[in-house]
Image (cartoon, rainbow, N blue to C red):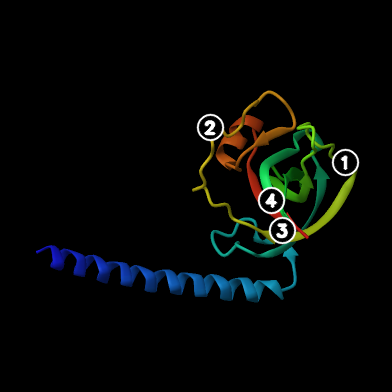
Amino acid sequence: MLCLFFMCLMCWLGVWQVHRYHFKKNLLSTYQQRLIAAPKPFLQVADSADGLQFQPVWATGRYLNALTMLVQNQFYQDRVGFHVLTPLQIPGEKKLLLVDRGWIQQGDNQKLPGIDAVIGDVKITGDIKLLNEYQFTLGKNILEPDVLPLVMQKLILLKLAVLLIGHFILLLCD
């Protein structure tokens, strides 16, 4: 009886692995196709229900520097730091485009690093990244929600939308 149970379990796991293989193969194919594609205007693809992952886009707007956020414990070349996220207000749009402006190193003294404000209208180009909401946190995600810039362990758009009263779509800039 126990052998039958394990045989069924192994068959089910084998089928699951085949499904994961096909999912990853399709994901890689989409990524490679979009890597060489020309960027489209963000507003042209923003309302699309699917197919946004890795889509190259461009947008013009103004950074809301006061709402800059930091995602902590991000590693780059064996150094710890932060990803800098700043909302971009596109003229005539209610939704904000959340732009990953890159990585900055954490200082030795545990103080938050200085972040240069970007003034005026900017044109940005990048790839859309859909977020994986299944990440774990060590304790509270946002330790001090009343202190800006917000420092968080992971990006949860629904909580940010409530906290900052806005709706976001994430864009990774080149």
Q: Relative to the observer, which residue lies in front, 22 or 48?
A: 22
Q: Residue at x 65, y 25 (%)?
A: 144
Give the distance between the C-alpha atoms of the residues marked 4 and 2, in whole angstroms.
19 Å
Residue reaching furthest to the top: 146
Q: Relative to the observer, which residue lies in front, 169 or 32?
A: 32
Numbered disc 2: secondary structure: loop
Q: From the image, which quarter does the C terminus lie in? A: bottom right
Give the distance between the C-alpha atoms of the residues marked 3 and 4, in whole angstroms.
29 Å
Numbered disc 3: secondary structure: helix
The residue that disc 1 covers is: 116
Q: Are marks 2 and 1 in contact (CB under 8 Å)?
A: no
Q: Which mark is residue 42?
A: 3
Identify which amino acid the numbered label 4 is placed on.
Phe
Q: Residues within 10 Å of mark 1 (few under 14, many from 20)?
A: few
Q: Residues within 10 Å of mark 4 (few under 14, many from 20)?
A: some
- From the viewer's perspective, is 28 left or right of 55? left
Give the distance between the C-alpha atoms of the residues marked 1 and 3, in whole angstroms.
25 Å
The percent coordinates of residue 28 (x first, y second) are 57, 73
Identify which amino acid the numbered label 2 is placed on.
Gly
Give the distance between the C-alpha atoms of the residues marked 2 and 1, in whole angstroms.
29 Å
Give the distance between the C-alpha atoms of the residues marked 2 and 3, in whole angstroms.
35 Å
The residue that disc 4 covers is: 75
Judged by depth in the image, the label closer to the viewer, 2 or 3, is 2
Q: From the image, which quarter does the N terminus lie in? A: bottom left
Judged by depth in the image, the label closer to the viewer, 2 or 1, is 2
The residue that disc 2 covers is: 139
